[in-house]
Amino acid sequence: MLTPLGGLGTYEGSFTVDLGAAFLGRPLRETRDLLRRADPWGVQPRDALRALNADKPAALGFLTELVRVGLLSGPDSEDEPRTEYEHDYRTWKLTPSGRVLAFASGRRPSTRRAADALVAKVVKAASAINENPDAYLWWVQEIRAAGHYADPGREQLLHVDLAVQLRPRLADPREQAKAEKRLHDDALDRRAADRVLDMRGYGHWMTRLALAGHSKVVRLYSPGPGADGPVLFREARDLTIDAAPTPAYEPPADPAPADRCSWCRRQLPSTRVAVKGESVDRSPIALCDTCLPLSRTNATGLSGYLSLGWTIRQTISALATEPYHLVGCALCGNARGAEGQWWPEREREQEAPVTLRLCDVCPGLLDLADRPDRETWWLRRHEAACIDGFHTHLLTTASAPAVPRQDSGKSKGRALPRLTEVHRQLLEDVRAAGSLSALDLGRRDGRPRHQDTRWWATRITHLLRHGLVAVVGTDSDPWTARVRAVQDDERALRGELLALHVPGPVWDGTAVTEPEPPAEWTVRSVALDALQAERDRLALALGGTVSTHR
């Protein structure tokens, strides 16, 4: 018998299924989606109508089949509606097996060749762990093939199951426990283990993570008695050692707070923060209670405890009453501080706008901007640029080494997503009709009951996020906005624009600026606008209808 290597509640025991496999004459995805629609009372016939895209007799017949195979129980009442217009309130409850399938994640099966490549990486990682067993306080004694992977004749594999024998680094369990506590506390100091809660200890979790990461394909198990799968790795050395007895372990004491804020530079008790991955307790950077909420983490940012007692509005009120610095920026004292009327949206809340001297960094740190007419994307880029500047100034003030800055303005050329049959059919419907909205899809003809419009809005949003469809016109309502399919030439032109220039504020290493686009970008932007306008016109003129199948 195999048990998850990390115990209950760990990712090794997650349940994954092939959603494309046939189940009761339908793709397993439809059954999983139907079970996911269950509320605390269970599943009703209307849920089956929507999930299966079927008429009522077929939907009720499928619910009966799910009861037969043990995924549902019920219904709780045998009373049927007296007329075809009366709602059917009968409810089928999920069994334990039904709940497991409802929360299962889907994945396509891997080939034997791909599985062998994954196993080769695990074996290589095991060798690296055993070369430095003190790093994780565990070492790998043996790895065997298990489950379907142990069958050489099986070509399609949903999982790669491995039976892994781990051994502790120290022979004395008490010394091993002390060493793991020291390892864990050091990780907490670097804010690398805030969310780790493992049944087998922090070192054991780090060893499993080094072997297989968070893979949903590779699953690690503890070998049971008589495990006889093919041996994939075996360590000839005994890496468990004896350790000299040490005193009883005492957790490290909390460091004394600093007496000066690194940002506003006031003489106040301040909490230490650090560059991600560095020791917080020994960090030279500290922030007072007012500035501490500004230390949110970004890709190259700072980490530390956030103060929940202070809000942005309290900071604004404090600065308006008594600026922290009489010269330069009212918040940080930067000499580039310029006086302006900030946060005009306060007028809509019947509050007077605030007039302050602020530098080009502090407005974004306060989560607000000086232009109420700005679009959401501009405000987000402005805030991100200010956070980059905030981190740079803090590191310079504390004489800490600079962190390499990632240019968020460059497009990474994200590949197109793997589409399900539902999304592929939705794209075909949009191309055939020219343009469609979630409301159109919910009201399409030939249906016994219209599909849930919210359900279609979610799928359209997924296609919008990946640039496969575009909104026609100015309507931004996810239910009523009409979308059209985006062709390859339009998508390629948009990618070229992003590679040349991304509009909006950026941190240039010295200040928050908004660079002017190059001439080539302007020419291509005009071409893209013209192409999009023409495609919008053609999509609206097509005036087709949506197909009645999914």
Image (spheres, rainbow, N blue to C red):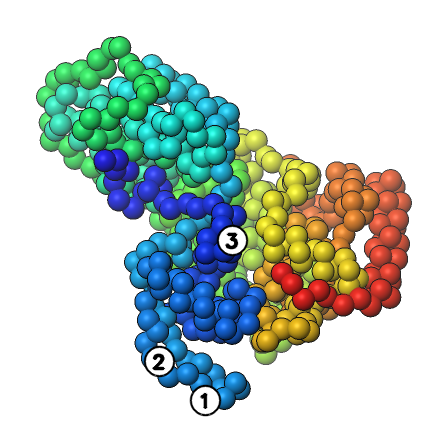
- Which tag, 3 or 2, sits closer to the chain's start? 3
Can residue 327 be seen in the rendering of this structure? no
Q: Position of residue 195 (x, y in %)?
A: 34, 45
Question: Which quarter of the picture shows residue 409?
Answer: top right
- Left or right of 499: which side holds 397? left
Q: Which residue is drawn at 50% across and 88% down?
A: 83
User: Mark 3 to mark 2: distance in Å?
Assistant: 28 Å
Type of amino acid at the residue the image marks with label 1: Arg
- Pick the quarter of the image with the N terminus: top left
Nearer to me, 403 or 158: 158
Amino acid under disc 3: Pro
The residue labelled by disc 1 is: 82
Q: Which amino acid does label 2 sit on?
A: Glu
**Res. 364 mark:** none
Q: Which residue is drawn at 77% across and 60% down?
A: 432
Who is closer to the viewer here, 201 or 363? 201
Residue 333 is situated, as x and y percent measured from the top left of the image, at 56, 48
**Which residue is at the front of the view, 144 or 120?**
144
Left or right for 418, reference 67: right
Say which residue label 3 marks.
27
Residue 394 in percent (x, y) is at 51, 40
Find residue 74 and report its image quarter.
Answer: bottom left
Q: Is residue 359 above or below residue 277?
A: below
Residue at the location (76% across, 57% down)? Answer: 431
Classify mark 1: residues with Cα within 10 Å, few (<14), some (14-19) or many (20+).
Answer: few
* Residue at the extreme top of the image, as rendered: 236
Tell me how far mark 1 sits from mark 3, CA to CA.
Answer: 33 Å
> Residue under circle 2?
78
